[in-house]
Amino acid sequence: MRVSVFGATGSIGESTFDLLIRRPDITTVALTGGRNVDRLAQQARALRAQLAVTAYDDCYADLKEALAGSGIEVAAGTEALIAASERPTDWVMSAIVGAAGLAPGFRALAQGATLALANKESLVTAGPLLMQEAARHNARILPVDSEHSAVFQALVGEDVTKVERVIITASGGPFREWSKEKLARATLAQAMIHPNWDMGQRITIDSASMFNKALELIETREYFGFEPAQIEAVIHPQSIVHALVGFRDGALMAHLGAPDMRHAIGYALNWPARAELPVARLDLAQIGSLSFEAPDPERFPALRLAREVMDLRGHAGAAFNAAKEVALDAFIAGQIGFQGMAALVERTVDSLLSDAGLTDPVVALETVTTMDQMARSRAREIVLRMS
Ligand code: NDP
């Protein structure tokens, strides 16, 4: 099998690397990263990749130097990323963070590769298009987000028309028990401490604000095609149950596992087989109890916003995601407070409601890009007024 990894130097990329390094039977075609060129070069040498690509032109010389004498091809820039996704491969890990992950995944599907999709933003911004592209090229998308992998696994051998509801779990993040007043003063350092998962900076903060779960509600709808009313999110502080699928007869099938992304990545890598994976085995007696509670929409408005976006459909997901990315940047830069992120996203999407295009069906990558850019510039204007 030939594989390529997009976003190899990130949290998901490192977990993928950890599985690939144990598999000498797999050929690595391309590895891509951003600014962490030293790590990209190390990975490329270790996996004997054919090609290493940095997304940034100004990192080219460093990457070239780091791979000197290795015989590994080096490239840089957005066009090079796209070209890498067009290299013949059987399996592609999509683990770039943000909307930048959409185009390479799209191209990988066009060459018929199986797309292991960690980049949830692809489905949020261009779900119908991505699913159509997969169908058109007889390519498969396998979910790598732990909740969606869990739903996928709970559905094996089942009749999806008999599904009544899907429940995805959320840890509740570090601010689960914080009051609204305390949340107003939440700092970046506090938002960066996830109770259970070790992840990249952006998704960790999105988990604290529940925007990660908001994206996942939309992702569930786009990938599996369930109606918004069938999709629920529940707080589960232990992060042991990743998702549950409820059937017409009242049965709930749950997926349990240690909070380790190598499980979902390994499942996608070996699918439809199951292979031995280097993940911890659960000791249920030691865990003792599992608890669940309803999310609080007052303190965490992101889930409500996601439902509005699911109702609007069209390009609302692209606007929502772009505004969320600007809000996250503004919070990281100290321009807005923690709760300002939801306020900013809501104001941005509302302000675009009257603009032509927000609810038009997604028909092309170009229209998604246009809405993404429009929402980013609108959100940046609002940040200036807020800060
Ligand atoms: P990280 O921030 O850890 O890694 C992101 C990767 O993308 C890095 O390789 C980074 O390069 C690269 N990158 C960043 N910006 C760009 C860009 N503009 N163009 C090309 N490459 C870029 O993210 P995660 O691994 O945490 O998340 C990746 C995706 O997977 C996200 O969509 C996230 O929502 C999703 N996901 C993550 C989970 C997790 O456990 N981390 C769980 C489920 C889903 P470099 O670091 O070299 O600059």
Image (cartoon, rainbow, N blue to C red):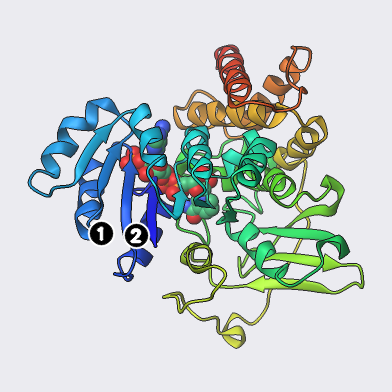
Q: Read off the residue under disc 2.
A: 17
Q: Is residue 256 left or right of residue 355?
A: left
Look at the image and tell me whether residue 373 can be seen: yes
Q: Amino acid at mark 2?
A: Phe
Q: Residue 174 location, x and y as percent?
A: 57, 53
- Location of residue 92 with respect to 34 vertically, above or below: below
Tag 2–tag 1 contact (CB < 8 Å):
yes
Frontmost residue, 354 versus 110: 110
- Location of residue 359 with respect to 95 vertically, above or below: above
Q: Residue 58 location, x and y as percent?
A: 23, 26
Q: Is residue 18 left or right of residue 111?
A: left
The structure residue drawn at horizontal position 58% and vertical position 73%, both measured from the top left corner, is 257
Q: Secondary structure at mark 1?
A: helix
Q: Amino acid at mark 1?
A: Leu
Q: Read off the residue under disc 1.
A: 47
| Mark 1 burial class by Cα count in 10 Å: few <14, some 14-19, many 20+ | many
Q: Quick one: which residue is furthest to the right in this view? A: 249
The structure residue drawn at horizontal position 67% and vertical position 63%, both measured from the top left corner, is 152
